Every structure is written in C-alpha cells, then in structure tokens.
C-alpha cells in the first residue's frame, strides 16, 4: 500500500476518539433499538421508498437519524484508525497493512458466503448491513494485533 494514500499519524487519535463511542453506540442500538425523538428530522434523500414500495428520487423525507449518525461516525473513525500512518511507517509495517487488508477482505467474503447459504429473510438484510462494517473492523483488529505481537516479540528479545 502506497504511503501517499495514508493520512498523517495525528489523525489516528481522532479516529479512535470517534470509533470507540460509535462502536459502543452501534452495539447499544443493535441490542435496544433506541432512537431518540430529538433526532427525528426532515432530511434530503437521493432515493426513498415507503412501506408500500412507492419510491421517490431527490426528495425530503422525515426520518430518525440515529442509525445514520452512528454508522457514518463508525465509518469515519474506522477509516481514520485504519488508514493513518504509524509513527515509524516502514516497509515492514506497509507489508503488515497490506496483508491485513487482504486477510480482512478474504474473511469478510467467507462470512458473507456463509450468510448467503445459511441466512434468509429479513435477517439477511441485517447481515448485509453489518457486513458493510466488518471489513474495516477485521482489518483494524488484525493489523493492530500483528503490530502488538511483533512489538512484544521485539521487546522480549531485548
């Protein structure tokens, strides 16, 4: 992965500050389905449909923005955490980053394949929604785990 595409290291802390609360709120939304009333707003929509399947392009819709805010925050935070340079970005870390990304995409599509075979109905829609976030989440977890494991092995050798 080219270093030109990575953000400066200072954005990583901002990413963690956004990612951790949005992850926790996302889990809370899954468990409780809580949507505060003050987030019921009218907003612009490129495409929306009602429960009868009537679709409208470029319209104003009245929705609760809780899921939108939490999901967008998670994506922004995860992108900042995942795609910022490390303090000492070198070829070894670039190799770990590249292999972690490949590994995350592979695991994500294995999980998606299993979902295609084993999950049906409206539960499949939920799986697809969660699937949007899993590539970034798996990548961040694996990349940081490999960095931690290598840092620990280097400190053990000293």
Image (cartoon, rainbow, N blue to C red):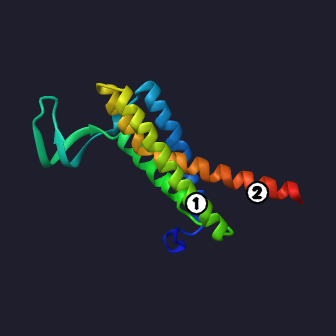
Residue that carries the numbered disc 2 in the rendered image = 151
Residue 41 location, quadrant:
top left
Picture residue at 21% right of the left edge, 48% below the top: 45
Query: Considering the numbered disc 1 on the image, is that residue within a helix, a strand or a loop?
Result: helix
Q: Visible in this render: residue 36?
A: no
Q: Say few, some or many: other residues with alpha carbon within 10 Å of mark 1 (under 14 / 14 to 19 / 20 or more).
A: many
Residue placed most toward the observer, 13 or 3: 3
Picture residue at 45% right of the left edge, 54% below the top: 76
Picture disc at residue 121: none
The image shows residue 71, relative to residue 150, as above or below, that is: above
In the rendering, at what x and y percent does residue 54 appear? 10, 36
In the rendering, at what x and y percent does residue 46 appear? 19, 51
Residue placed most toward the observer, 158 or 43: 158
Residue 15 location, quadrant:
bottom right
In the picture provided, is 30 more to the left or to the right than 158? left
Picture residue at 24% right of the left edge, 47% below the top: 43
In the rendering, at what x and y percent does residue 143 appear? 61, 53
Residue 38 location, quadrant:
top left
Q: Visible in this render: residue 43?
A: yes
Picture residue at 64% right of the left edge, 70% below the top: 91
In the rendering, at what x and y percent does residue 85 appear? 59, 66
């Amino acid at each position: 992965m080219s270093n030109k595409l990575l953000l400066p290291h200072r954005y990583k802390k901002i990413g963690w500050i956004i990612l951790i609360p949005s992850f926790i709120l996302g889990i809370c939304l899954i468990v409780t389905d809580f949507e505060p009333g003050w987030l019921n707003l009218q907003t612009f929509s490129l495409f929306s449909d009602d429960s009868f399947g009537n679709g409208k392009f470029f319209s104003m819709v009245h929705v609760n923005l809780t899921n939108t805010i939490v999901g967008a925050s998670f994506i922004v935070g995860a992108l900042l955490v995942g795609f910022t340079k490390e303090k000492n970005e070198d070829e070894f870390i670039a190799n770990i980053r590249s292999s972690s990304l490949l590994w995350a995409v592979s695991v994500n599509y294995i999980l998606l394949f299993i979902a295609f075979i084993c999950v049906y109905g409206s539960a499949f829609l939920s799986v697809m929604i969660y699937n949007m976030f899993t590539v970034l989440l798996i990548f961040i977890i694996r990349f940081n785990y490999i960095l931690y494991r290598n840092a620990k092995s280097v400190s053990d050798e000293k």
